[in-house]
Image: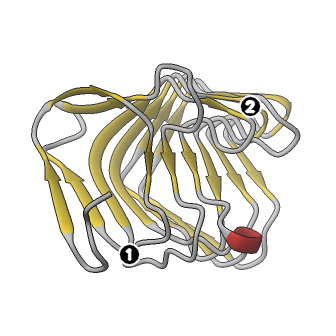
Amino acid sequence: DAASEGDTVLVLPGTYKENIHFKGKNIIVKGEGRETTIIDGDQKGSVVSFQGDETNDAKLIGFTIQNGLSGRGGGINCDGDEFLAGPTLEFLHVKDCQGVGDLDGGGILAGANTIIRNSIFTNNSGRKGGAILTYGNNITIENCKIINNEGREAGGALQLQSKNIVIK
């Protein structure tokens, strides 16, 4: 809450049972590494939320994101104002998260301009998009591994409902 636009928040290794919200701020939240720095949502909503006007300058780097449960992005929710929240998500392991709504995405609900790089998605489930549901335009998914995710209706790995998607 105390972070201001442009700040970097460094997080030491450990397991943190909480749900965090960027509150429209373009800040960097950086963990020590996805193997050692864990945010556990304890099935109390999206583990991480970007629901304002965050741009690619809002960054989440170096975490395991686990045990999210939400109707809009079980692990990470980037829906913002008219799906305009577009953070940069790097070196993450999103696992054991569930999307439970009409527009869910088990691992991530990606808004416009979201960049997802060097990340791993395992054992996530959702009605659409077990690992990732894109709902905003101009999405980049680069160098990611998607393993053992489930889409109950469509898209076990990916459900792409966007224009201009780059997958590398």
Q: Could you say which quadrant of the image residue 19 lies in?
A: top left
Q: Is 39 located above or below residue 133 in the figure? A: above
Q: In this view, does 9 lie to the left or right of 108?
A: left
Q: Could you say which quadrant of the image residue 84 lies in?
A: bottom right
| Residue 16 screen position, x and y as percent | 27, 28
Instruction: From the image, tell me which residue sits under label 2.
Output: 126
Distance in Å between CA atoms under marks 2 and 1: 28 Å
The mark nearer the N terminus, 2 or 1, is: 1
Instruction: From the image, tell me which residue sits under label 1.
Output: 26
Q: Nearer the viewer, residue 4 or 153?
A: 4
- Amino acid identity at mark 1: Asn
Q: Is residue 121 left or right of residue 129?
A: left
Task: Kindly identify the residue that appears in the image at 47 percent across and 20 percent down.
Answer: 42
Q: Is 60 located above or below residue 124 in the figure? A: below
Task: Kindly identify the residue that appears in the image at 49 percent across and 70 percent down.
Answer: 24
| Residue 108 screen position, x and y as percent | 59, 47
Task: Kindly identify the residue that appears in the image at 78 percent across and 76 percent down.
Answer: 163
